Image (tube, coloured by chain):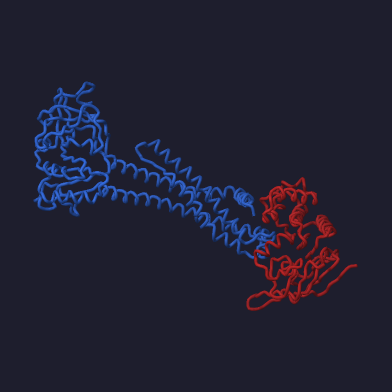
């Protein structure tokens, strides 16, 4: 039998029961739409979170004071840990695989300039921060490579803080007061936006040693090490531990690689995407049951037609294929409608709520349609086999 | 030359723990172009015999030779192919597919055989023309009268140009006039060379045939031959 005739015959029976076919296909359409919509949102969130994390580059290792225990990272204030010092950071800088080392202290302080005051986040950082975190300077320059223990009192403004303090006038060379000490503005950063809730533009960067004394602390919050891409991360971690343990006498600090964070995050997000897809899968199961039901009814209704086809010379395999084809076409139509529905709703959601990240990979679309067709195939097997096994004489007698 | 030879055909059915001999040692030879009627009360085995000749059923023992070929032991698929090529069926209840037009119904056996669209189209047109149905080609079965429906069924049975035409109570669902029309058509086809076998319990109808078999309890009880 020719494929064209096969399809024509299949479609003729689907069209003959328009309403019934449409409702059956709708069952699959709802399932596919749910799967596509949920995975689109899951994938959108996945991408969004990963992007937030990787915008600083992936060759970063973070060192925090205190040994991580099952209870989390100690703050380094309590206990007997030695503080992470500027000297520790300088020692790490001498390791061969290191491209950049950024000592890091954070706090809040009042910034004053030309009688304008604003309370902002103050970041104590090192001169290599723009390189390590792929940040760009808009005007002037970043903190210079001074003596790390006694740096000059220079400050670099975030773009929003600059706007707030100076408006449209040029801030370069101006004097500002941060927490009572005087600093000279030498640069303004490009806008970086909000990262996981932190506004990186409403901020000021000063040398780490000055931030330590400003906030009256003896330990850095963190040292970030950016390593050369060609070096294995294990080598980097081992090198850092050797250096710091030699200096501290014991491992009273925690080394976290960016990859570790991404791996954990990625696996959590994969579980999330899978879980929402499974929820959509439940509605697909219901749709599949609908196909089994309607195809069983169709076989019963058309028993005498099956007998006739056999009398006219149809083989069992041809009868099987006709009913299987009908189930697959029903599911495929449902699948395509479901794709349209799901992508449409996803697009609508994204238009109404631009902050909700939605992403539909083409692979998911193809997989979803393949899934719909497979469901039709599986759901159609039992009714189609029953049709093919009918005794033609018995079938002809049914009316 | 015989188109059908049945040799010591038995067909047994298991009903509960009893064995029913639906066909009991049937020996029959039907020549090409014959016009045969099979008569008998219900349960006499006439339908079983027709199904067996039509390759819808299989003998329990014995030999069936169709067109010189032993078809006793054909597989399901081979049976289906042979049915498609050599046998045409006309049923009491027409058995038209309700959602397909008259032309599409006639086309079905050619479609199943995998014939090309062009070839099919001319054959279907010819078959409909021969039965004066050309103006009804696009009508659905429910838009046709009983007589017209049976003519569509005959067109479908003959479109493959089979050697044997099997008619099971072909006038059973028709009024007298339409029934006579249908019989006249079948007989015209027989005049042109097709082997016609009619199963009926209507004696008047059966007597039109040149050979008349009377069946009883699975056996050929009596045979009459005209001329």
Horizontally, is B163 left or right of A322 in the view? Answer: right
Number of residue marks: 0
Residue A171, image x, y percentages: 19, 24
The one nearer the camera, A361 or A62, is: A62
Quarter occupied by residue A176: top left
What residue occupies the far top of the structure in this picture?
A: A169
Which residue is at 68% across, 56% downward? B113
Which residue is at 69% across, 66% downward? B56
Q: Give the vertical position of A181 relative to A322 (above or below).
A: above
Q: Give the vertical position of A99 relative to A393 (above or below).
A: above
Residue A347, image x, y percentages: 42, 39
The one nearer the camera, A177 or A89, is: A89
Horizontally, is A345 left or right of B96 in the view? Answer: left
Residue A5, image x, y percentages: 64, 51
Quarter occupied by residue A89: top left
Residue B6, image x, y percentages: 76, 72
Which residue is at 50% across, 54% downward? A374
The hue used for chain B is red
What residue occupies the far front of the structure in this picture?
A: A96
Horizontally, is A119 left or right of B66 in the view? Answer: left
Q: State the quadrant of the N terminus of chain A.
A: bottom right
The one nearer the camera, A368 or A288, is: A368
Horizontally, is A203 left or right of B1 in the view? Answer: left
Q: State the quadrant of the C terminus of chain A.
A: bottom right
Q: Give the vertical position of A278 relative to A149 (above or below).
A: below
The one nearer the camera, A239 or B134, is: A239
The chain assigned the colour blue in the figure is A
């Amino acid at each position: 039998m020719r494929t064209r005739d096969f399809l024509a015959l299949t479609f003729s029976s689907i069209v003959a029961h328009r309403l019934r076919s449409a409702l059956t296909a709708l069952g699959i359409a709802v399932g596919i739409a749910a799967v596509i919509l949920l995975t689109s949102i899951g994938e959108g969130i996945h991408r969004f979170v990963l992007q937030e994390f990787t915008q600083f580059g992936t060759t970063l290792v973070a060192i925090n004071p205190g040994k991580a225990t099952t209870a989390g990272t100690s703050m380094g204030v309590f206990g007997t840990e030695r503080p992470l010092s500027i000297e520790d950071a300088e020692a790490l800088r001498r390791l061969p695989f290191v491209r950049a080392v950024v000592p890091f202290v954070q706090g809040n302080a009042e910034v004053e300039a030309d009688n304008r005051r604003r309370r902002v986040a103050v970041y104590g950082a090192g001169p290599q921060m723009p390189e390590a975190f792929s940040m760009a300077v808009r005007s002037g320059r970043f903190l210079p490579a001074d003596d790390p223990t006694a740096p000059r009192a220079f400050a670099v403004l975030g773009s929003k803080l600059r706007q707030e303090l100076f408006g449209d006038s040029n801030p370069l060379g101006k004097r500002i007061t941060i927490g009572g000490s005087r600093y000279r503005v030498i640069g303004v950063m490009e806008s970086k936006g909000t990262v996981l809730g932190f506004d990186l533009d409403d901020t000021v960067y000063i040398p780490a040693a000055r931030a330590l004394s400003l906030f009256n602390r003896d330990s850095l919050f963190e040292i970030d090490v950016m390593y050369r891409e060609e070096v294995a991360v294990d080598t980097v971690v081992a090198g850092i531990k050797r250096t710091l343990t030699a200096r501290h006498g014991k491992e009273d600090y925690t080394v976290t690689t960016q990859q570790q964070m991404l791996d954990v995050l990625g696996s959590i997000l994969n579980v999330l995407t899978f879980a929402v897809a499974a929820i959509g899968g439940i509605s697909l199961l219901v749709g599949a049951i609908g196909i089994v039901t309607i195809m069983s009814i169709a076989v019963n209704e058309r028993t005498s037609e099956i007998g006739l086809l056999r009398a006219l010379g149809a083989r069992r395999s041809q009868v099987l294929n006709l009913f299987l084809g009908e189930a697959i076409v029903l599911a495929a139509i449902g699948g395509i409608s479901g794709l349209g529905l799901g992508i449409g709703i996803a697009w609508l959601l994204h238009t109404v709520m631009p902050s909700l990240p939605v992403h539909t990979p083409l692979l998911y679309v193809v997989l979803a349609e393949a899934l719909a067709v497979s469901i039709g195939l599986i759901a159609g097997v039992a009714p189609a086999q029953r049709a093919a096994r009918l005794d033609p004489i018995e079938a002809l007698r049914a009316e | 030359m015989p188109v059908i030879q049945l040799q010591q055909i038995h067909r047994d059915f298991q009903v509960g723990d009893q064995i029913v001999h639906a066909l009991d040692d049937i020996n029959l030879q039907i020549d090409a172009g014959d016009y045969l009627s099979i008569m008998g009360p219900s349960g006499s085995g006439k339908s079983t015999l027709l199904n067996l000749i039509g390759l819808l059923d299989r003998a329990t023992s014995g030999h069936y030779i169709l067109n010189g070929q032993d078809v006793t032991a054909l597989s399901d698929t081979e049976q289906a192919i042979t049915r498609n090529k050599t046998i045409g069926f006309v049923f009491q209840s027409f058995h038209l597919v309700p959602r397909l037009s008259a032309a599409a119904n006639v086309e079905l056996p050619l479609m199943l055989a995998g014939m090309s669209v062009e070839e099919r189209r001319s054959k279907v047109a010819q078959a409909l023309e021969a039965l004066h149905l050309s103006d009804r080609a696009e009508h659905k079965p429910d838009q046709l009268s009983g007589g017209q429906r049976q003519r569509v069924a005959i067109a479908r049975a003959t479109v493959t140009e089979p050697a044997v035409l099997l008619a099971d109570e072909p006038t059973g669902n028709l009024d007298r006039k339409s029934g006579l029309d249908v019989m006249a058509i079948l007989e015209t086809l027989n005049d042109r060379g097709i082997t016609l076998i009619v199963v009926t319990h209507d004696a008047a109808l059966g007597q039109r045939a040149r050979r008349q078999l009377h069946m009883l309890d699975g056996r050929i009880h009596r045979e009459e031959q005209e001329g």
